[in-house]
């Protein structure tokens, strides 16, 4: 296997994606020649072009001219003309996760995995290390507002990375610290069943390097079992696949764990103040300005990792209090005519529940209108009834057409199938995103909170509605 980091010209297929763009930014900082292609240009590709990347709109064999490494996403198909050209020319083709693994091999890796919460937890840890003066390299699946990027090449020894379980991407990583936020049913189009998914997570944590740590959420049964299954009679000691012992800790809100958050009090900024205990030690009170109990849980994971790394509690406390979150995670797009517009990446039933619960906790009795675009046919098929019960904290629910992403419709699923099984008092099928925007502009009233939910392009609904509301200050949409 070639040394991936020795490549001089790297071409990235799907360079604008959330997982690939931070890698491109790091390669540019390493003085590599970087080119890349994507089906559509975006602010992300424009930013990379501004830093020196050569960006192509669309895929063509000529785009890879001169490169000595091609990096692809798991979603890229073998019939992609750039991949076919690379195979024909003998240019190595690797997945982005393999490149991330090569970067981690040169550093102390902190890899955050889990069905939910990994992006925000990764961002929190990266921000804490940055504020502690450790100058980390980081790869996050979304722009970290406080760091101004989703990826950066740092001069320090740590690499903080989001570890994606889809397509077993995280099995390319050999971390010093592995964090598992939770394990729930997802990506069953790839894993087929929960046992295969659980086994993949088990393999991920067994790759922890000697002297490293496993940090798992004790509130999630499968994450807790992951830690307990190889503890050699001592919950503080965990064995990797080759028998090497590493440290292990549990964190959480509601259980007896090593790092326990409690005494949650909603603060005036929309987040929570809470206390954390590490065994018998009281680490004091912490503050978040981002909403939701799930973010207290994410913060507790970050506190545990920081403590393992020897970062002072005062630095952690100050950093978390200043943390503004990640783009598309309870992202407040703006307010017009008394209507607040929020976008969130939530595309799994548990994520939708947590986001809407956070909105209800923050905005009380204001009317919450949720617009959901199901993400992939397989996810809706596998979790249909879980989705049906995920919207209880919304007053009105609009369901849009399915965002196919990497899939074709081989299951005969339709968004109307979700509407049909929902018992929500006020749900309707909106169809296209354009029609959803039209419906919203007719129904929105001052005081409403609009939340778009999904991993596809449903976020454009919020932006379009906000623009229309801003232009129409006269309030003509309420008549």
Image (tube, rainbow, N blue to C red):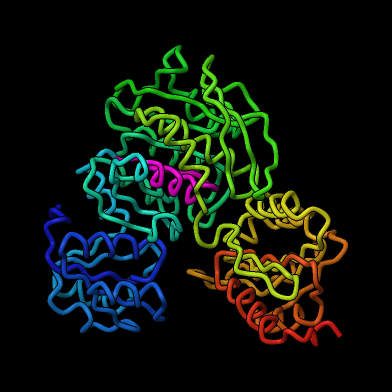
Give how far across and how far down residue 279 sits, in percent. 52, 17
Residue 368 falls left or right of residue 106: right
397 and 122: which is toward the camera: 122
Against 283, is 179 above or below?
A: below
Q: 253 or 5: which is nearer to us?
A: 253
Determine whether, in the image, residue 117 is placed left or right of residue 240: right
Front-lying residue, 167 or 164 = 164
Q: Which residues are magenta?
A: 109-128
| Count of numbered labels shown in the rendering | 0
Q: Residue at x 62, y 31 (%)?
A: 253
Give the residue at the far top of this rendering: 233
Residue 309 covered by magenta stretch: no
Task: Check the image and report above or below for 37 versus 318.
Answer: below
Residue 254 coordinates in the image, percent (x, y): 66, 29
Q: Residue at x 55, y 69 (%)?
A: 456
The residue under the point 55% across, 64% down is 455
The reply, left or right, for residue 356 in relation to residue 294 is right
Q: Position of residue 79 (x, y in %)?
A: 33, 76
Residue 419 in sight: no
Image position of 264 with respect to 439: above or below: above
Is residue 312 among the parts visible in the rendering? Answer: yes
Q: In the image shown, does 144 or 459 lie closer to the viewer?
A: 144
Q: Residue at 35% of width from left, 39% of height from top?
A: 132
Magenta span contains residue 121: yes
Q: Quadrant of the C terminus?
A: bottom right
Q: Is residue 94 above or below residue 119?
A: below
The picture places residue 111, in percent across and down from the top left corner, at: 37, 42
Where is residue 402, by image quadrant?
bottom right
């Amino acid at each position: 296997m070639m040394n991936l980091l020795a490549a001089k010209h790297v071409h990235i297929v799907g360079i604008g994606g959330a997982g690939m763009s931070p890698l491109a930014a790091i390669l540019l900082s390493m003085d590599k020649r970087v080119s890349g292609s994507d089906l559509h240009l975006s602010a992300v590709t424009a930013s990379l072009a501004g830093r020196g990347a050569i960006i192509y709109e669309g895929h063509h064999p000529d785009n890879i001219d001169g490169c000595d490494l091609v990096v692809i996403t798991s979603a890229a198909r073998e019939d992609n003309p750039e991949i076919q050209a690379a195979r024909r020319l003998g240019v190595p083709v690797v997945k982005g996760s393999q490149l991330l693994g090569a970067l981690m091999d040169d550093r102390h890796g902190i890899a955050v995995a889990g069905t939910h919460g990994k992006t925000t937890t990764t961002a929190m840890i990266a921000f804490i290390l940055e504020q502690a003066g450790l100058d980390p390299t980081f790869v996050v699946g979304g722009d970290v507002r406080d760091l101004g990027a989703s990826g950066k090449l740092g001069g320090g020894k740590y690499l903080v990375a989001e570890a994606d379980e889809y397509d077993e991407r995280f099995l390319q990583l050999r971390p010093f610290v592995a964090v598992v936020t939770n394990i729930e049913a997802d990506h069953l189009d790839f894993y087929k069943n929960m046992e295969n998914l659980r086994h993949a997570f088990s393999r991920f944590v067994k790759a922890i390097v000697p002297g490293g740590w496993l940090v798992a959420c004790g509130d999630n049964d499968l994450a807790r079992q992951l830690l307990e299954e190889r503890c050699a009679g001592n919950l503080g000691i965990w064995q990797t696949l080759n028998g090497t012992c590493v440290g292990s800790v549990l964190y959480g809100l509601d259980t007896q764990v090593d790092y326990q958050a409690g005494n949650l009090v909603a603060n005036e900024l929309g987040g929570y103040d809470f206390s954390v205990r590490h065994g018998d030690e009281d680490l004091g009170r912490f503050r978040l300005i981002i909403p939701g109990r799930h973010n207290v849980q994410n913060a507790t994971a970050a506190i545990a990792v920081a403590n393992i790394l020897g970062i002072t509690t005062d630095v952690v406390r100050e950093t978390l209090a200043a943390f503004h979150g990640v783009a598309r995670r309870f992202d407040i797009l703006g307010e017009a005519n008394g209507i607040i517009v929020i976008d969130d990446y939530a595309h799994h039933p548990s994520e939708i529940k947590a986001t809407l619960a956070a909105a209800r906790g923050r905005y009380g009795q204001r009317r919450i209108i949720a617009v959901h675009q199901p993400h992939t046919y397989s996810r809706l098929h596998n979790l249909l009834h879980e989705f049906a019960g995920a919207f209880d904290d919304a007053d009105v629910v609009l369901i849009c057409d399915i965002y196919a992403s990497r899939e074709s419709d081989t299951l005969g699923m339709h968004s109307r199938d979700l509407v049909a099984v929902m018992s929500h008092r006020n749900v309707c099928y909106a169809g296209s995103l354009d029609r959803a925007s039209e419906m919203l502009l007719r129904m929105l009233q001052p005081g409403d909170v609009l939340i778009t939910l999904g991993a596809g392009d449903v976020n454009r609904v919020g932006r379009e509605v906000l623009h229309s509301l801003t232009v129409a200050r006269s309030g003509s949409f309420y008549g």
